[in-house]
Structure formats: structure tokens, C-alpha cells
Amino acid sequence: MSKRIFRNNLDEIMWRRKIQVTDLSKLTNISQSRISAIKNNPYINLTSDTIARFCEALGISLADFGDLVEIEENPESKIELAHLTAA
């Protein structure tokens, strides 16, 4: 079974533009810790407002910011993950 999820390109965008977390935080009014979390986890859930702030501050489109990717959903891996996080 597969599902589609949004994957952001923030890490690559920031690297190409040589923009620091502190600078992007000032432009978007999003905390540095939140930007770091988004940058380091391209599959993190984002609100449409957060995405719009990044796109506006960086002068990019939604298509530039990220895309939908199809992933295989494996029920067994969820069980393993739950086991690991509970330990």
C-alpha cells in the first residue's frame, strides 16, 4: 500500500542560496528551531501558512518549495518504530 506525502526542499534551497537559519527566521517570522526542524526533516507536516511564508520570503513557487512523493506504507515498520520509541 502506498500514499502520497509532501516533501520540502528547504535544505537544498537554503544551501543553494547560502541563506542561514537566522536570516530566514527574520524574513519569515518563524523560529530558528522550527526552521532547523523543517530543514532537517523534509517530510515534516507543514501548514499552508508556513509554506506560504517560506515561498514569499524566498521568492519561490510551491513547486520550487516541495513536491508530492509516493511512499510505500508498511504496517510492520510502524510496529517496529512504535517498539523502538517505547523503549
Image (tube, rainbow, N blue to C red):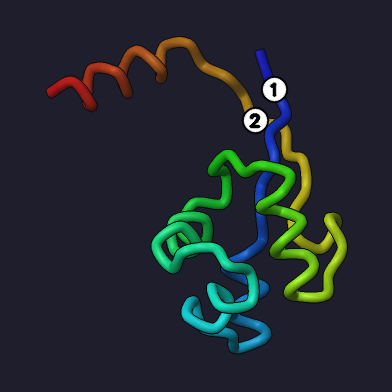
The residue singled out by tag 1 in the image is 3
**How many labels sit on residues?**
2
The residue singled out by tag 2 in the image is 71
Residue found at the far left of this picture: 87
Residue type of the residue flagged with mark 2: Ile
Residue 7 picture location, percent across and down: 66, 47
Q: Residue at image x 83%, y 56%? A: 62
Q: Residue at image x 41%, y 19%? A: 77
How dense is the environment of label 1, judged by Cα within 10 Å: few (below 14), some, or many (20 and up)?
Answer: few
Is residue 72 positioned above or below 52 on the image? above
Image quarter of residue 23: bottom right
Is residue 79 positioned above or below 17 on the image? above
Image quarter of residue 53: bottom right
- Element at badge 1? strand
Residue found at the far front of this picture: 29
Residue 38 picture location, percent across and down: 52, 55
How dense is the environment of label 2, judged by Cα within 10 Å: few (below 14), some, or many (20 and up)?
Answer: few
Asked whether, in this view, residue 27 is left or right of residue 55, the answer is left
Spatial CA span between label 1 and label 2: 6 Å
- Element at badge 2? strand
Q: Residue at image x 60%, y 88%? A: 18
Residue 81 picture location, percent across and down: 32, 23
Is residue 60 positioned above or below 44 on the image? below
Decide which of 62, 84 is in the foreground and name it. 62
